[in-house]
Amino acid sequence: MVGIISYGAYIPRYRMSRKAIFSAMGWLNSATASVARGEKAVSNYDEDSITMAVTAALDCLNGCPNDSIGGLSLSSTTAPYLERQNAAICAAALDMRPDIRTADFCASLKSGTTALIYACDAVKAGDIERFLVCAADSRQGKPGSSMEHTLGDGAAALLVGKGDVIAELKGTYSLTRDFPDYRRTHEERFIRGWEERWVRNEGYGKIIPEALGGFLKKYRLKTEDFEKFVISCPVDSTLNSICKKMGVEPARIQNNLMDRVGDTGAALSLMMLVAAFEEAKAGERILVLGYGNGCDVLFFQVTDQIEKIRERMGIKKHLERKENLENYLKYLVYRDLIPVDTGIRGEEVPPVRVSLIQREGKTLSALYGSKCKQCGTPQYPRQRVCINPQCGAIDKMENYYFYDKVGRIKSFTGDYLAFSIDPPAIYGLVDFEEGGRLYLDITDCRLDSLKVGTSVKMSFRRRYADKRRGLYAYFWKAVPI
Amino acid sequence: MAEGIRNKVAIVGMGCTKFGELWDKSSEDLIVEAYKEAAEDAGIEIKEIDGAWFASCFEEVNVGRGGIPLARALKLPNIPVTRVENFCASGTEAIRGACYAVASGACDIALAIGCEKLKDTGFSGLPDLGTGEENRFYYPNITAPGMFAQVANAYFAKYGLSREEGKRVLARISWKSHQNGALNPRAHLRSAPTLEVMINAPIISDPLGLFDCCGVSDGAAAAIIVRADVAKNFRPDPIYIKALQISLTPATGIGHQSWDGIHFESTRIAGAKAYQEAGVKNPREEINLMELHDCFSISELITYESLQISPIGRARVDVEEGFYDFDGTIPCQSDGGLKCFGHPIGASGIRMAYEVYKQLQGKAEPGKRQLKDNLRLGLTHNHGGICGSLVCSVAIFGNEL
């Protein structure tokens, strides 16, 4: 039995009301009033598709041993690197074993469902025991555009395997159409579209029903055979009319997250599937339709194992964890869409030494420190001589990682002198419950919410972008729990 | 314990430039100026110097690397010239190198000089720590106020002080230094604002505001060191070295939970060893004046305790009672301290020695800011690096053998 073993998701903490976008930019394009409803999820300045995918993956793994996982993919249209595998960066952060098969699935909105099909095939073929499928997107519409309102940021992760699956894969079907509804070359920052009516009616409105028809024909099934339809169509009116034509009543349509998250691109179908799993009961049959340059169809049947993995953050709990971002200009600065004064200090960027990052390896990527075999003290970064003043043993260390450990703030500050794109720079010393002390940036919080003793967990973030040398550096930060 | 440096060497001449934003002075100007005052004070000439120790910390900014900037400025004639750098202890390290050379018999007359040009960066505060792997990858983009602000927050939490109560104690420390600095013509900052102005100043790194932070300055200071037994051949009132201690905490504070975050371990160790070296049994009774490393108000507060002058947790009481004021029991920062005199890093340790030297001689601008009491022993203290991994220097000077 091949299917999904576990699920996880991530939605960034910031939500921006679409009215706030419209009040700032509606003067330019008054027609956007029609999409200026609800709110969208906006990644923090230190997040991107890689960091969101890693956070969703950690939610999905939830303590599952890494060494059973033989494959990892990242689906995204906004993976930070065009050359240098983004999935490999995720695998390093997730401390995956070295003999793992990795791949980036890119360029299409359906790359999330496509990766899921390939992962299931690989497991079915017996080459790989477990395959982690990650999808994340942070797409950018031009300021003032309709897409700026509708697009949102988020991620999902699904662990594919055999045996105790929460949902068995019962069938797939794929349709490919070179339909240029949205496009972006490597030279462009913003997505281009064609007339929205054409995209709605000729794209979503025709391709989704065609794929569904093909699937039903292939397996000799009817729409009545399914309890839930997960259709990654971000336009409510189109979604409703497609379903009406197919004879699917609203109760069987999975919410498309547009109201509270937005169109999360390659991650949308998988995030919706996670949301469906959160409510699903054993026996439920779910049909997933992942739209994009065609459409993938996946048929899952939920098993009674689903009750065993309810303690994920998933979609539901991430939706509850939020902070309003009211300042539209701040959003533009986070996205590096307007030049701002960084001060002379902010202009002084020392060169990144790539070989040094490589040498540090897991110390940086998976927050590896050492644990002294003589006195048991966890320490970071990796040491040869024990840091415990009462011990001092030499070369008695074993590897010890901090990325999944919980700590408490020992001391902190909000620094207005240090350069930060989001001042003040908040950082401090964190004491871990199981031992060890790290000096860490603290993110996703307000300074006035912190106290000595506040509990924090580790979050993989983009540390900085060295634009002159085309390099993103990633590291772990503390996030209040 | 080793015998130590006590009474083996003496300072017979010192010089110190005005500190400040010296836009029109180069490091050469500052070195020559500090040297000239020291040489005239000691009555010596360049050709009599056997060896020189030169302190500068952020050499990238302006001064240059190695011993060359000093040798070039003074045209030192092919003698050993060594640059020392150990963060904010750099100046005291130069004194230490010169003292040890003289004590060992390697030199008869040694020069210690520190110079720093910090004001050509284009921004406030110190330059970032640079490109070392630690600063770039493991640690947040830490600034000096950011490190000490954390100590302040932890101290407030430990003793149950509200942010307002804590800030008031800290402001009282800076207020005292401004009162002193206002009287000193060589000091960088000579204003004397009210306590309320200080408390309400803009935040630099929470909870530290503008007046909790010292001046970032240009400047230089110099000392001429000879053996104690010949010191009176140079002048009737040499100042004797009683103790010179360095201690460096090996990152335990930032990597091991044993550090409480509210004391300075290297200061505690260097202080205790310095008292022992100098034969000081009760520092609160025997030390007559101190120049402490008040890069930030909280640094001075914690140092009172770590140097075992104020009991642990009681420094704020001493501060409020004026124990460290100009007319207090142990005047601290009588020249204005780093807070007002300024902090050109490589020069600061020597600047502190300069103030202690002049006060112990009774020559600190008599009638204006000379301390009145019968002074015998003065202490200087520097520390730098990362809170939790600080290098600390403690020196004790006396006017009697």
Image (cartoon, coloured by chain):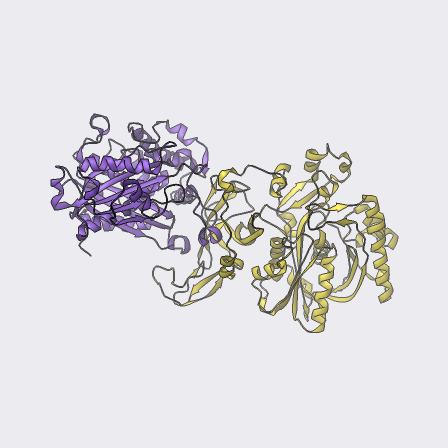
Task: Measuring from the top left, give residue A397's x and y in whole percent.
Answer: 42, 66
The residue located at (81%, 44%) in the rendering is A196
Whether residue A369 appears in this view of the structure is: yes
B301 w.r.t. A253: above or below: above
The percent coordinates of residue B100 (x first, y second) are: 21, 51
Tell me if B172 is positioned left or right of A323 in this view: left
> Which residue is at the front of the view, B166 or A161?
A161
Q: Tell me where residue B56 sits by quadrant.
A: top left
Give the tally of numbered discs.
0
> In this view, which residue lies farthest toward the top?
B367
> Between residues B266 and B134, which one lies in front from this camera angle?
B134
Residue B255 left/right relative to A141: left
Image spot of residue A270 (x, y percent): 71, 57
B357 to the left or right of B134: left
Q: Colour of chain A?
A: yellow
Placement of A340 over or under A243, stated as above or below: above
Quarter of the image with the N terminus of chain A is bottom right
- Residue lying at the far bottom in this picture: please name it: A126
Look at the picture and state if B173 lies above or below A469: above
Residue B178's x, y, as percent? Answer: 33, 30
Judging by colour alone, the chain drawn in purple in this rendered image is: B
On the question of residue B291 being in view, the answer is no
Question: Which is more toward the observer, A369 or B26?
Answer: B26
Res B361 quadrant in image: top left
